Amino acid sequence: MFAGGADAMTTAAVRTSDPERSKWVGVGLLVPVLLFFLVLNVIPTFWLIGLGFYKYTLGRGDPTFIGIDNFTAIIDSPEMWGAFSRTIIYTVVVVGFEVVLGVALGFLFWGSAKMPGRRLALTLLFTPMVMAPVAVGIFWKLIYEPTFGIINAVIEAFGGSPIDFLTNIDYAFGAVVFVDVWMWTPFMIMMTLAALGSVPPAELEAAEVDRLSFWYRARHVILPHAKFILMLGILLRTIDAFKTTDLVWTMTGGGPGNKTEFIGVALYRQAFNSLDLGGSSAVAVVLLIIAIAFTSIYLYVLNWSKRR
Amino acid sequence: MAMATAQKRKAKNTIYYIVLWAVALLFFLPVLWIALTALKSNVDILATPPKLIFQPTLDHIKRVLEDPETLPYFFNSVWLSVGSVIVAVGVSFPAAYAFSRWKFPFTDFLMFLLLSTRMIPAAAAIIPMFQMFNAFGLRGRFGMFILYTSFSIPFSVWILKGFIDGVSERFDETAIVSGAGRMHVMFKVILPQVKPGIIAAFIFNLIFVWNEYLFNFVIGNAQTQNIPFGLSVGLLDAGGNVDWGFVAAMSSMYVIVPMVMIFFFQKYLLVGMTFGTVRGDV
C-alpha cells in the first residue's frame, strides 16, 4: 500500500539516525488512519455542529441560519425531555438488573474451570450479546406474539388471557427491558469473571486459610482488586444502553404511543421521518457531548486501574 | 471414609456443573426456540399452543437459500464485513505501532477521540454522514466499504496498541542496531508477537460489521443491503402478514456465524467486547 515510500524513509532515518527524520516516519505510519478519521469522523462532526445552527428540512428549500434556536428548541420540547428521561430510566433499570444478575451469576461461574463442555456452555451463554440487535428484536417479536407466541401459550396454560406485550401500553417498556437484560446480562457475567480473575490467587488462599466469611472476603479481599474491571463493565453497559436504537426500533418502533421511544429512536424519527435535519443535528450534538463525557469517565477509570 | 468424602465432593461437583449448564441453556433457550421455529412447517408455527414435538422440515431453510432476494443480502454481508475489516486492521496495525513507539504528545488525545467515536449513538453519527454521502454520491459499494472500514478502525487501533505496548521496545532496538529497517521491525519482529491482537481485532470487528443495521438501512443502497436490512424489510412488508418461517430460518442461519466465532475464539471475547481496553481470560 504505502510500504514502499515509508520503507525508503525508514532506511534513511536509521542510517542518518536523525531523530527529526525518524519522527516523520512515525507520523507517516499514522497517515492512513488519520485520513479515515479526518474524512469520516472529523468533517462529519463539524458538519453536524454547523447544521445544528441552521433551520433545514430536507426538500423544503435551502438551510437558513438561525443561531442557537435549535438548541433552545430542545429545552422547550416536551418530546425531547420525555425521550431523554425515558432513556435515562431505561438505562438505569437495565444496567441495574444486568449488574446484579451478572455479578451473581459471575460468582456462580467462578469455579467452572474444570466444567465438562465449558467452551460450548459459555458459547451458548454468550450468544445473546453477539447477535445482531435486529435479529434479537425479531426473535422476541415471535416469542411475544399474542396468538401463537410461546410466552402467551404459557400464560394461557396457567389460565391467564393473552397479552400483546409489545403494543400494550402497560407492558411494552418492561418487555423491552426484559430483552435487554437477557441480551446483556451475559456481558456482565463475562466482566465479573474477568474481574474475579484479576484478584491475586495468593490473597484468596490466605483468606481461605483465615476462614473469613464470604461477605468479608468479597468486601475486603475481592472488591479492592475486582472493582476496576467491574466499573469498566458497568460504564460500557451504561454507554451502550443509552445508545439502544436497533433493538427497540425492530421490536416496537418506539411505541405504543411513545412508551419505548428512547433518544436514539426519537432522533432517528426527527431526522429521517420528519426530515428535520437542523433540529435533529442539534440533538445529535447534545448526544455527542454526552458520549465524550462518558468516554472521559471510562478512560479515567481505565488509567486509574492501570496505575495501580 | 476418605472414599466417602471423595464421592461426596464428586456428587457436589456434578450438581454444580449441572446448575451451570442449566443457566447457560436458559440464556440460549430463546435462540433455540427460533431455530426450532425455522424447522417447523407453517401450520406448526401458527399452532396454539405452540408445538414442542413436530415433524421437522427443511423447507424454510431451502426457501432462504433459493430466494433470489436473500442471496445478494448474504453476499453483501460477507464481502462488506470481511473486506472492510481486512483494510481496517491493515491500516490500524502501522498506526498502533506508531502510537505505541513514538509516544507523540497528541497520542492520548487521539486515542481518546478514536474511542469516543464508538460511544456516539449511531442515529447521531448518521445525520451528517447521510448528507455527505448524498452530496458526494457515495451511497453505494465504495461508500459503505469505507464507512465500515472507518467504523472498524478505532477498536483495531485500541486493541493493537494494547498488544504492542506489551512487547518490549528492546526488540525494536536490537533489530535496528543490527541494521533492520522499521518495516522489517514492524512486520517481522512485532507482528508475530501480536498475532492474538490481530485475530481479536479481526474477529470482533467482523461481528460488529456483520450485525450493523442502521447505517446500512439509511445510507446503503441495493448494492450494499445486508442481512439485517433484509430481516427488517422482510418483517415489515407483505401487509402485516409476516412470513415467520422464512424470517426465523434467515435469522437463525445469520447468528450461526457469530456463534461459531465466539466458540473458536472464546479467549478473545473479553478484549473483543471491551473495545480492546480490558485484557484477560474468561
Image (cartoon, grey):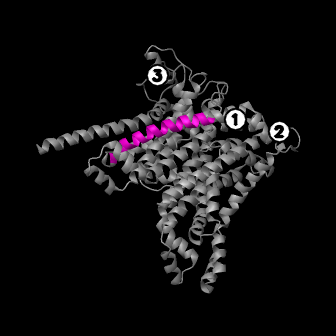
Q: Which marked residue is nearer to the observer: mark 2 or mark 3?
A: 2
Instruction: Judge from the rendering whether residue A77 lies leftward or rightward of residue B258; answer left or right.
Output: right
Q: Against B6, is B162 above or below?
A: below
Q: Which residue is mark 2?
A: A57
Q: Which residues are magenta?
A: A87-112
Question: On the rendered structure, is A233 left or right of A199?
Answer: right
Closer to viewer: mark 1 or mark 3: 1
Kind of element beneath mark 2: loop
Instruction: Give the chain of mark 2.
Output: A
Secondary structure found at label 1: helix
Closest to the observer, B213 or B235: B213
In magenta segment, residue B151: no
The image quadrant of residue B234 is top right
Distance of label 2 from label 3 (alpha carbons): 48 Å
| Magenta-drawn stretch, dominant element (helix, strand or loop) | helix
Q: Front-most of B58 and B244?
A: B244
Residue density around tag 2, few if under 14, some if 14–19, many if 20 or more, within 10 Å: some
Query: Do the residues marked 2 and 1 share a common chain?
Result: yes
Q: Amino acid at mark 3?
A: Pro
Q: Position of residue B4 (x, y in %)?
A: 14, 41
- The tally of labels here is 3
Question: Residue B33, image x and y in percent?
Answer: 46, 31
Residue on which the image places disc 3: B50
Callouts 2 and 3 on one subunit:
no
Identify the residue at horizontal 61%, vertical 53% (top origin): A296
Query: Which residue matches tag 1?
Result: A266
Type of amino acid at the residue the image marks with label 2: Thr
Q: Is residue B153 left or right of residue A223?
A: right
- Circle nearer the N terminus (2, 1): 2
Q: Left of B32 or right of it: where is A299?
A: right
Kind of residue at badge 1: Ala
Q: Say whether residue B233 is visible.
A: no
